[in-house]
Image: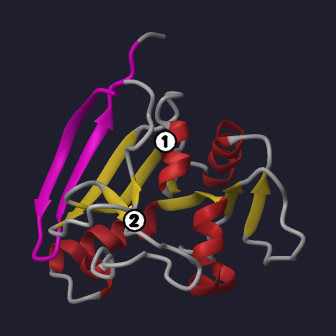
Amino acid sequence: MALVISDMSISLDGYVTGPNDSRENPFGDGAGTLHDWIFGNPDEAERAIMQEALDNTGAVIMGRTSFDKCVDMWGENGPVAGVPIFVVTHHEPAERYPSAYTFVTDGVARAIELAKEAAGDKVVGLHGATVMQQALPLGLVDEVFVHIVPLLLGAGTPLFGSLGSAVTLERSDAIVGPSATHLRFRVVKTGG
C-alpha cells in the first residue's frame, strides 16, 4: 500500500510561500530561494533526494490554491511527469485541463483514497500546506519530509499553521546540504 508523504520546502520559520503569493508570484515575496536546493546547484546528496522523490512518486495530491498558482509553471504534466495529480477543490473548474489532473470535490480523505489506488506501491506526495493541514490530523499522513532553507520570511503560508492538535513525529533521517537541511519524520499513529 502506498505511503502518503508530505514533502515540502520551508523557510526556517515554517513558511512554504512568502507573503503576496499569486499565480504571477507563486512562491510569494522573498521566497525565491525556497527551492534552490532543487533548481540551483544541488550537491550529490540533494540530487539523490530529488531523484528518489521522482522515482518513487506514484500520485500527487494538491489543493486548489497550489494548483491555480502553479499549473502554468508545470504545464500539462504537473509537478512529476507521468504521474496522476488529484486536486482537492470545492468546485470543478469550468476550464478543461489535461487528463493528468483529476479534481476531487468530496474532500482530502477521498483524494488520498483515489491517489493510493493510482499509486499502487509507490508514494502519494502531498503538495501544498492546506491539504497537509487537513490530512495530518485525520491520521492520513505517514511521513513528513521538510527541506528547511536558511531563510526567515516572517509571513506567508505556514506549513503547520492550523493542525488543531498535537502530532507526534519520530525523526528517521537528517541530511545537511549546502542549500537546505533535509529532515524526514515518521508520523507516530496512536490507537487502532
Considering depth in this image, is 65 or 140 the residue closer to the camera? 65
Q: Which residue appears at 45% of the width and 61% of the height?
A: 56
Q: Which residue appears at 39% of the width and 51% of the height?
A: 159
Q: Report if residue 182 lies within the magenta region.
A: yes
- Callout 1 crowding tier (Cα within 10 Å): few <14, some 14–19, many ≥20: some
Q: Look at mark 2 in the image and give the residue it sits on.
A: 53
Residue 10: % across, % down:
30, 61
Residue 4: % across, % down:
49, 45
Q: Which span of residues is magenta-colored?
A: 166-190
**What residue type is disc 2 on?**
Ala
- Upstream in sequence: badge 1 or badge 2: 2
Q: Quadrant of the N terminus?
A: top right
Residue 168: % across, % down:
29, 26
Q: Is 142 on the left-hand or right-hand side of 108?
A: left
Q: CA distance from mark 1 to mark 2?
A: 21 Å
Residue 175: % across, % down:
13, 60
